[in-house]
Amino acid sequence: MDEAEAFNVGNPETREQLPKMLGALSGGLTVLIFVMIHHLWISDIWFNLGPMVLAGAVCGLVIVWSYTKAVSEHSPRRWFVYNGFQIGLLVALGMVSFVVLDPKFTMAEAMVMDDALAELIPPALPLMILAILVGTFLLWIAYGRKRGALAPILVTQVLLVFLVGHNLAILGLVELSRDLLAVFAEFIGLTAFLGVGFAAGLMLLARVRPRLH
């Protein structure tokens, strides 16, 4: 089975419908595995499983949607590169957050906030919006400035920044410390896991599905 066949690119109808369905499935499954790992090594977040799996499925669907609109010649290599671009944009968001945001809280204060996101998201919101616009522009330019790809890429960036990248965007609001750098490294690792796991999961599902018929 060659790369094109593995990704089902020979059938236009399959290319438009199947990958998005597999994207939602792979996104949901990746988040489920992420929750298991988070429970074992960090903390219990099973109470938030439903919304997180839903968010993963939605993000998976729109990533595939934007990919099929932006990339003309489909292959596993191009698929991994596209997802790597998304991971890089999220990591860059975290790094820029350290530079442009003024710290307002210590790590200890942030850890004991009753609703930390409600306190941290508003000051980081302009940076998040800027990240969406810059990320959309860079992806659109990098993938040929196709008119039909602009809206899918924009929607994908909005969802990724608000559902995944918000944790990285708020880091600059916390005073720099060794603990904060450890958290940053942890967030990078978890983001990379989500991105690579999702991309690999979709490729695996695309290869396995024809054998089930």
Image: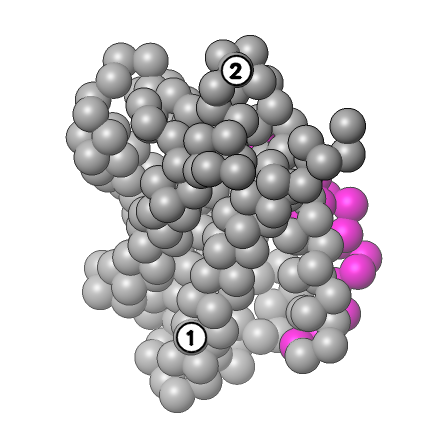
Give whichever of 59, 117 is nearer the camera: 59
Q: CA distance from mark 1 to mark 2?
A: 41 Å
Give whichever of 58, 78 is nearer the camera: 78
Counting from the top left corner in percent of width and height, residue 76 is at 43, 42
State the SS at label 1.
Answer: helix
Counting from the top left corner in percent of width and height, residue 78 is at 35, 40
Nearer the observer: mark 1 or 2; the answer is 2
State the SS at label 2.
Answer: loop
Residue under pointer 2 = 11
**Against 145, is 75 above or below?**
below
Counting from the top left corner in percent of width and height, residue 119 is at 51, 56
Which residue sits furthest bottom? 178
Point 77% across, 52% down: residue: 49
- Applied colour scheme: one colour
Decide if residue 154 is in sight here: no
Point 74% across, 66% down: residue: 36
**Against 151, is 134 above or below?**
below
Q: Is residue 63 left or right of residue 29?
A: left
Which residue sits furthest front? 1
Three-letter amino acid code of the residue under disc 1: Ala
Splitting the image into 4 quarters, where does residue 66 fall?
A: top left
Q: Is residue 121 left or right of residue 52?
A: left
10 Å crowding of disc 2: few (<14), some (14-19), many (20+): few
Q: Which residues are magenta?
A: 42-62
Secondary structure that dominates the magenta span: helix
Point 38% across, 21% down: residue: 69
Counting from the top left corner in percent of width and height, residue 5 is at 51, 30
Q: Is residue 16 left or right of residue 55?
A: left
Three-letter amino acid code of the residue under disc 2: Asn
Sequence-first disc among 1 and 2: 2
Residue under pointer 1 = 185
